[in-house]
Amino acid sequence: MKRLLVIMMLLTGIIAPFTGAVDDRPLVVTSIAPLAAIVQDAFGDSVEVVYLIPPGADPHEYQLTASQIELLRGASVIVTTGGHLPVEKKIAELKEEGTITGEALFIDDYKREGFRYLPEHWYGGKDNPHGVWLDPTNALAIARATEKVLEKTDPANAEKYLAGYRDFEARVRAITEAYLAIVDGNLTAVIQMPPDQYALEWLGIKAIASIKPEEEVPAIGVDELVPTAAKADVVVYAVDSPDQLKDAARELAAKSGKPSAEIRVFWKDEPYTKVLTENSAAVVKALGGKPPEKIPTQRSDVTQYVVISLVVGLVLGTALGVILKK
């Protein structure tokens, strides 16, 4: 019955597909597409993944439809960004009242696996709940929490889920080690919006100001931010953000004489490790460095992956280590 419901929803466009086949694998429903990318990259064909909020919709405004609530009733696992989005708050209510019986993952589940919020240095130091998946530490925490509940709901395939997580973890750590070997750290950035922070600070690049400080706060004028940007090392913005804000970031980079890096915050149908690599490469290039070469992003032989990534990263880090130093 659950699979029939999913097929009907896919055909009518009510939910957004991440994979093609519909079968008896555990159904994992995520609130947004990047979380689906993490789950799919980690567990591959062992799970079926769909996401709720369509690409292009404002996740802070989107509300669950009746059909999506029915979909959630049939989910084995539900993965949220932590619980701050309206859709996720509704999922928590449905779980509390018993409408949803599957395992629903929220911030406390992730914190047990090493998840961390970053403080908004430009906005009173409050926890930043936006874009948390861009930090590889958080992506691993989300994947690990998902793996544990998959084992709980489907113990017969526990070894498969654990193997998938370990492969994903090895690939993510190989990528991060390769880039950390290049970036010296102690750098600063002006970002376009709060989510961009999570693509930077694991690299040691502190976000000291944001053109749009928070969801409910108006954007700061470019001219007002020029003195701050002039003291920073890079201006970072998201390609998937509104054109007006992208234009403001580019103008800020031009007026301050600083390089700019274009990253992705929201995406669909691409592996998490691919986007992690691309975002990191964009930042490194903007800072004048050369990204590591031949770092695979697909599920592959873990040993070969780790060796290639670390060797290339460390060699380039030795050769280019002084490039990104202040």
Image: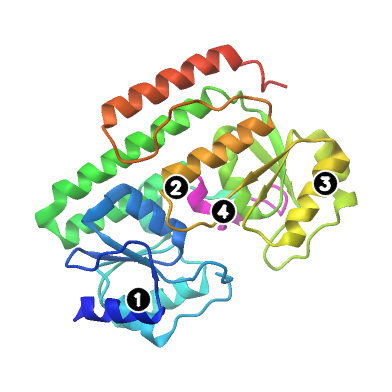
Q: CA distance from mark 3 to mark 1?
A: 42 Å
Q: Earlier in the sequence, mark 3 or mark 1?
A: 1
Upstream in sequence: badge 4 or badge 1: 1
Mark 2 Cα-neighbour bin, 10 Å: few <14, some 14–19, many ≥20: many
Q: Are marks 3 and 1 in contact (CB under 8 Å)?
A: no
Mark on residue 138?
2
Specify whether 224 is left or right of 14.
right
Q: Secondary structure at mark 4?
A: loop
| Numbered range of the magenta stretch | 120-135
* Residue 203 drawn above or below residue 322: below
Task: Examine the structure image and report whether residue 130 is included in the region drawn in magenta.
Answer: yes
Q: Amino acid at mark 2?
A: Asn
**Residue that mark 1 sits on:** 10
Distance from Cα at disc 2 to Cα at disc 1: 29 Å
Query: Viewer-nearest of labels 2 and 3?
Result: 3
Between 118 and 215, the one lying in front of the other is 215
Q: Earlier in the sequence, mark 3 or mark 4?
A: 3
Image quadrant where residue 27 sits: bottom left
- Residue 202, image x and y in percent? 54, 37
Pointer 4: what residue? Answer: 265
**Rendering coords of residue 7 (x, y %):** 28, 77
Q: Nearer the viewer, mark 2 or mark 4?
A: 4
At label 3, the amino acid type is Leu
Kindly tell me whether residue 106 is visible in this rendering. Answer: yes
